[in-house]
Image (cartoon, helix red, strand yellow):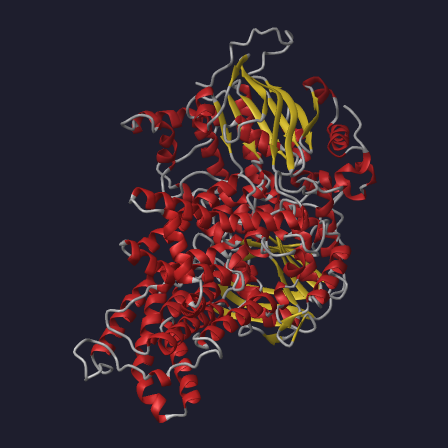
């Protein structure tokens, strides 16, 4: 069923199994970015090859090339020693390269079986019975049980991913590529994924495991390759990986990822904090912030409910108090009402019930602009789609929330010099790197875009700030900088951090509430075992949930 | 493993200039000029080829257009033609910048024209002439503006596609104008469906020394005022934000509904003023079957000028000459006047070609602002030229 790669006698190292897929000298440039620069590596049957690198290191591009979405500018891909040209996703599947993407590609309205049979669409008639049998085989192989008739939309994310893996292997793949497979999963689902991968490995499948989380790469990979800024820094071979103790290995890999600069980064250790470590090692890195005396309540939510939009669920029965000097994290798997909560607070979405009070006074009837004038800010998670206007300059983007206000507009006319001068100060303060404040914001990198947004939200008298996925897709340095800014909110202000990155919340928050299916289901303080408890709440383990919540479903 | 140089990871990837783009302000200006003028020139050449095929001498034809449209005193006719064209163009620019497709200009124009044609004959006698003109201009503007309210409310509150609603309202407006002309405003002394003719002495006064009515000055003033409003005021910036990224507009607290209604209002207002300038300055009455469709011919020039109210003036002047001179020139050689529409269509065609080529090479800026361009293009296609959209940094919620 899953091929075991018998070919490939092309004189490669005789001691180890011949590579299923070899990549040599792959180069791919995008406008302004050399995404892949002369990259070479290979994958062998029965091994998990971890591909590690920061955001922007070129991992996804390499994966896109292997799965036929992008074609390389130069370089060669060999399967079983024979050069191939992968110019379409279909070709990749024909060759036997199956890919599981970070985000679900299942069609929500179809059943599991129907989704899988989409891969058979070359045939005129669909053979449901054969497909069912095949699904059964895969279920046995992976050690999971999937209901063929369940609608994809009704499956938990971890289960969806298992279906995705089966889908990738459906037509007899020999190489499985997993792109950031754990980013959307709860800690429990991650464990299940490890088990599944172990079984596939035993069956002789070659796997490329793409991740930016160090501990996953180390704990799962037989070999580890590190990409940095489009270049292959190096590969740790199986012997090295097997013979080195995990923490030493992490040290080595950190050095590969960041060079000697890693030593200068005081916070680099935090990179290593994984959910498991946090639980087992017990807060070695995630130092629990000492419980501080907090001040007056700044933001209060009482019985707040807001409707969903499209596939994006709403929230209900939200009770939450944010005190002065406090950073509260909101944990939860993506798509559990995070956006509805953030927009309800910012004023972008109407409440269907409940009350929001800012500094003790109700703000339900105030619009976005009036709330923002009071000092309530919302750092959106969708910085390209909602945060910036790409065609406008950096300076105008920094002032989009105070259009028409003195002293930047006077007698109805814009005072461009005043705006540019202030924007230059802000660029300095927030370390925005751009040719000038006139630069169109759409040409900035993700990190600089985020800094422009931070400058806009954190300046001009911010008191209470809602951060929504504040470090998503950012490079390490910007990430650390943003987290530091969040910590500084403790100085007389307050922050609500909505994030799907539990490590991040454990690091910055004084306490963490958990959002599940549009309701707050529990609360925990960072510390030993917090990750496990929060993970349990995220997937609906009700032992810690608030009484009464979940009595009736949202919507 | 190799050691890697120190602080390298701390620097962001620099964003280099777009590959192949001409650098510097001068180069950009040249690019833009080329891109604006080339479609017009190509259309004239292709039109010439067409004339040869039809058995006419293109050089004689074009010089005849120039002679009848610009030489001697002919320019005054063209100048008068500019008034309604420019006002409609500026009205469309306001809406288009906000990414609002007000295609109901014919209905807005004709309804305003019918109503002031009906009101003018009695008003100019009852009121002092200056005051009468003021009232008529205001009425015309308001009629045009009010005729946008239904599409505006539907778009603001129900996100109804305004292309459809404005077109539907346009048909209703044209029909209503005919009912008014054949009914209450019918001149009883004639047999054809038309309103009472204004006396020449009761028409808009001329600019001293010319036969050009002052409606042209109103149009030029409107272009300048709208240019100022768009480039300097908060209203203009809000419109640009709405046009470029409606979700950002909502996020930054712009009252999107209010802004949609306001943009529609001013768009219709200016189109209504165009009707007043044309009726009171040139025609003095309206017939039921009259529909000059000014808006249809103006649209290509609005985009050639990249929605800039000042840059559109020379294009409108060009078209005014082509249209007044061309009407006579086509009659001279026995062509239907619709040949002029063929030229306009050719301009549109070549704009499309250049826009397509411009995407591949750096042929100056697009005719469309970024927001519109992105809205018109295939999903994801517009991101190609933005280095920020490097694959690893695509936003998570692309699917929404």
| Nearest the eye: A536 or B183 | B183
- The front one of A187 and A413 is A413
Please name the residue shown 39% across and 32% down the image. A116
Left/right placement of residue B396 relative to residue B325 reads right
Q: Quadrant of the N terminus of chain A?
A: top left
Horizontal side, residue B175 vs residue A261: left or right:
left
Asked whether residue A519 appears in the rendered view, the answer is no
For the point 80% across and 32% down, the residue is B5
Q: Is residue B180 above or below residue B86?
A: below
Q: Position of residue A449 (x, y in %)?
A: 65, 51
Quadrant (top left, top right, bottom left, bottom right) of the C terminus of chain A: bottom left
Q: In x, y percent, where is residue A150?
A: 37, 40
**Is A133 on the left or on the right of A225, as rendered?**
left
Q: Is residue A340 visible?
A: yes
Closer to the camera in the image, A243 or B30? B30
- Residue A359 quadrant: bottom right
**Number of dots carrying numbers:** 0
Percent position of residue B132, x then y: 40, 87
**Foreground of the two, B15 or A454:** B15
**Residue A218 picture location, percent across and down:** 68, 29
Q: Which residue of the protein is positioned furthest toward the left in this rendering?
A: B191
Residue with the most extreme right position: A264
Q: Is residue A459 above or below residue B137?
A: above
């Amino acid at each position: 069923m899953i091929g075991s790669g018998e070919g490939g006698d092309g004189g490669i190292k005789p001691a180890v199994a011949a590579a299923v897929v070899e990549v040599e000298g792959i180069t791919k440039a995008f406008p302004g970015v050399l995404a892949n620069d002369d990259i070479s590596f290979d994958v062998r049957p029965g091994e998990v090859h971890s591909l590690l690198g920061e955001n922007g290191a070129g991992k996804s591009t390499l994966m896109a090339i292997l799965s036929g979405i992008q074609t390389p500018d130069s370089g060669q891909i060999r399967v079983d020693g024979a050069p191939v040209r992968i110019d379409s996703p279909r070709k990749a599947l024909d060759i036997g390269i199956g890919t599981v993407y970070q985000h679900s590609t299942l069609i929500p309205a179809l059943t599991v079986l129907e989704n899988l049979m989409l891969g058979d669409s070359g045939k005129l008639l669909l053979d449901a019975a054969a497909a069912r049998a095949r699904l059964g085989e895969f279920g046995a192989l992976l050690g999971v049980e999937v209901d063929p008739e369940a609608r994809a939309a009704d499956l938990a994310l971890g289960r969806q991913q298992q279906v995705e893996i089966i889908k990738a292997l459906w037509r007899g793949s020999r190489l499985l590529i997993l792109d950031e497979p754990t980013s959307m999963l709860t800690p429990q689902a991650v464990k299940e994924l490890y088990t599944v991968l172990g079984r596939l490995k035993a069956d002789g499948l070659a796997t490329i495991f793409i991740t930016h989380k160090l501990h996953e790469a180390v704990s799962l990979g037989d070999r580890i390759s590190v990409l940095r800024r489009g270049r292959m820094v190096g590969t740790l071979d199986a012997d090295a990986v097997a013979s080195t103790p995990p923490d030493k290995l992490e040290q080595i890999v950190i050095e590969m990822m960041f060079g000697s600069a890693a030593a200068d980064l005081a916070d680099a250790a935090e990179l290593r904090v994984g959910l498991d470590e946090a639980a087992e090692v017990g807060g070695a890195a995630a130092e629990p912030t000492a419980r501080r005396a907090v001040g007056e309540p700044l933001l209060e939510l009482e019985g707040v409910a807001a409707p969903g939009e499209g596939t994006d669920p709403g929230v209900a029965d939200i009770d939450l108090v944010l005190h002065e000097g406090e950073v509260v994290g909101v944990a939860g798997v993506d798509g559990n009402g995070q956006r509805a909560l953030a927009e309800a607070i910012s004023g972008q979405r109407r409440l269907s019930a409940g009350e929001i009070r800012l500094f003790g006074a109700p703000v339900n009837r105030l619009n976005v602009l009036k709330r923002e004038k009071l000092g309530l800010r919302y750092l959106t998670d969708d910085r390209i789609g909602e945060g910036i206007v790409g065609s406008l300059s950096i300076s105008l983007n920094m002032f989009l929330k105070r259009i028409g206000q003195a002293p930047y507009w006077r007698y109805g006319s814009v005072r461009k010099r005043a705006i540019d001068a202030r924007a230059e100060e802000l660029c300095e303060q927030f370390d925005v790197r751009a040719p000038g404040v006139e630069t169109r914001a759409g040409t900035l990198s993700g990190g600089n875009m985020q800094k422009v947004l931070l400058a806009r939200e954190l300046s001009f008298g911010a008191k209470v700030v809602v951060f929504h996925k504040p470090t998503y897709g950012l490079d390490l340095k910007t990430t650390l900088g943003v987290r530091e800014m969040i910590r500084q909110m403790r100085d007389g202000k307050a922050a609500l951090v909505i994030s799907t990155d539990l490590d991040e919340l454990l690091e910055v928050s004084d306490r963490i509430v958990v959002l599940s299916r549009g309701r707050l289901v529990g609360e925990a303080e960072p510390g030993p075992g917090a990750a496990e408890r929060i993970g349990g709440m995220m997937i609906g383990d009700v032992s810690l949930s608030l009484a009464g919540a979940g009595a009736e479903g949202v919507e | 493993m190799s050691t890697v140089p120190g602080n390298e990871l701390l620097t962001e990837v620099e964003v280099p200039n777009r590959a192949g783009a001409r650098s510097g302000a001068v180069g950009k200006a040249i690019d833009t000029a080329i891109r604006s003028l080339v479609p017009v020139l190509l259309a004239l050449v292709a039109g010439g080829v067409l004339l040869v095929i039809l058995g006419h001498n293109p050089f004689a034809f074009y010089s005849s257009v120039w002679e009848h449209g610009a030489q001697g005193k002919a320019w005054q006719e063209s100048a008068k033609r500019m008034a309604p064209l420019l006002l409609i163009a500026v009205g469309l620019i306001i809406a288009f910048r906000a990414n609002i497709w007000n295609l109901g200009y014919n209905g807005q124009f004709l309804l305003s024209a019918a109503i002031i044609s009906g009101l003018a004959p009695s008003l100019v006698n009852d009121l002092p002439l200056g005051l009468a003109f003021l009232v008529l201009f205001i009425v015309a503007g308001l009629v045009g503006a009010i005729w946008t309210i239904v599409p505006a409310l539907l778009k603001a509150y129900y996100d109804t596609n305004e292309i459809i609603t404005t077109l539907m309202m346009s048909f209703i407006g044209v029909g209503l104008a005919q009912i008014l002309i054949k009914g209450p405003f019918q001149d009883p002394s004639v047999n054809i469906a038309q309103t009472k003719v204004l006396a020449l002495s009761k028409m808009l006064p001329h600019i001293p020394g010319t036969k050009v009515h002052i409606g042209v000055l109103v149009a030029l003033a409107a272009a300048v005022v709208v240019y100022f409003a768009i480039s300097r005021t908060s209203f203009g910036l809000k419109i640009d934000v709405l046009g470029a990224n409606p979700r950002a507009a909502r996020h930054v607290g712009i009252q999107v509904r209010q802004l949609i209604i306001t943009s529609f209002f001013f768009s219709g207002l200016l189109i209504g003023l165009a009707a007043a300038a044309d009726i009171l300055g040139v025609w003095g009455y309206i017939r039921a079957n009259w529909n000059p469709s000014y808006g249809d011919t103006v649209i290509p020039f609005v985009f050639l000028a990249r929605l800039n109210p000042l840059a559109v003036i020379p294009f409108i002047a060009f078209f005014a000459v082509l249209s007044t001179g061309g009407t006579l020139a086509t009659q001279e050689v026995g062509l239907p006047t619709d040949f002029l529409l063929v030229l306009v269509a050719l301009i549109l065609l070549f704009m499309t070609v250049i826009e397509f080529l411009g995407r591949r090479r750096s042929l100056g800026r697009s005719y469309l602002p970024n927001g519109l361009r992105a809205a018109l293009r295939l999903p994801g296609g517009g991101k190609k030229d933005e280095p920020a959209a490097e694959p690893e940094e695509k936003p998570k919620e692309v699917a929404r």
